[in-house]
Amino acid sequence: MLFQPPVFETIFRTPVEHRLVIRGSRSRGAPLDGVRWYHDEFDAAGALVARYETYDETDAAGQARCGWRRYDAAGRLAARHEVAMRWSALVALKQSRRGAEIALQRAGIPSSSAPLSRRVLAA
């Protein structure tokens, strides 16, 4: 299978004057299978605007999913979006990586604004 990772700037709708910097990624194998990416978004002045966690995985219950979470500079969950399939299946369904990226752009606002744990921010 050919794996084409998403263009994260497209999914997050990062303004052209902002920088999106990858902080790292983590992968894991069976029975939980997947990968997570961590990004920081900086404005034109270099100030932290947001942090992102993006994932493509099969969870403990065997459910496939991919999506993202956006945290504001203070660590509060600001938006999220998830689809119930792996990234490769979404690309196949939309018949292109660009189509899959557009499908992942929709954002839902969380019901809670609790700060993100230090463990995830440090990842």
Image (cartoon, grey):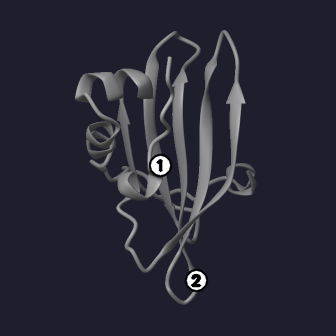
Q: Amino acid at mark 2?
A: Ala
Q: Horizontal placement of 102 versus 42: left or right?
A: left
The label shown at residue 69 is 1
Residue 11 appears in view: yes
- Regarding mark 2 in the picture, which secondary structure is present there? loop
Q: Residue furthest front?
A: 2
Q: Nearer the viewer, residue 120 or 31?
A: 31
Where residue 28 sits in the image (x, y, percent)? 70, 24
Q: Residues within 10 Å of mark 2 (few under 14, many from 20)?
A: few
Mark 2 to mark 1 CA distance (whole Å): 19 Å
Where residue 95 sits in the image (x, y, percent)? 25, 28
Residue 86 appears in view: no
Mark toward the start of the polypeptide (2 vs 1): 2
Q: Nearer the viewer, residue 80 or 100?
A: 100
Q: Horizontal placement of 120 versus 65: left or right?
A: right
Q: Residue furthest bottom?
A: 45
Where residue 40 sits in the image (x, y, percent)? 59, 64
Q: Quadrant of residue 51?
A: bottom right
Where residue 38 sits in the image (x, y, percent)? 62, 51
Q: Amino acid at mark 1?
A: Arg
Residue depicted at x 73% and y 50%: 123
The label shown at residue 47 is 2
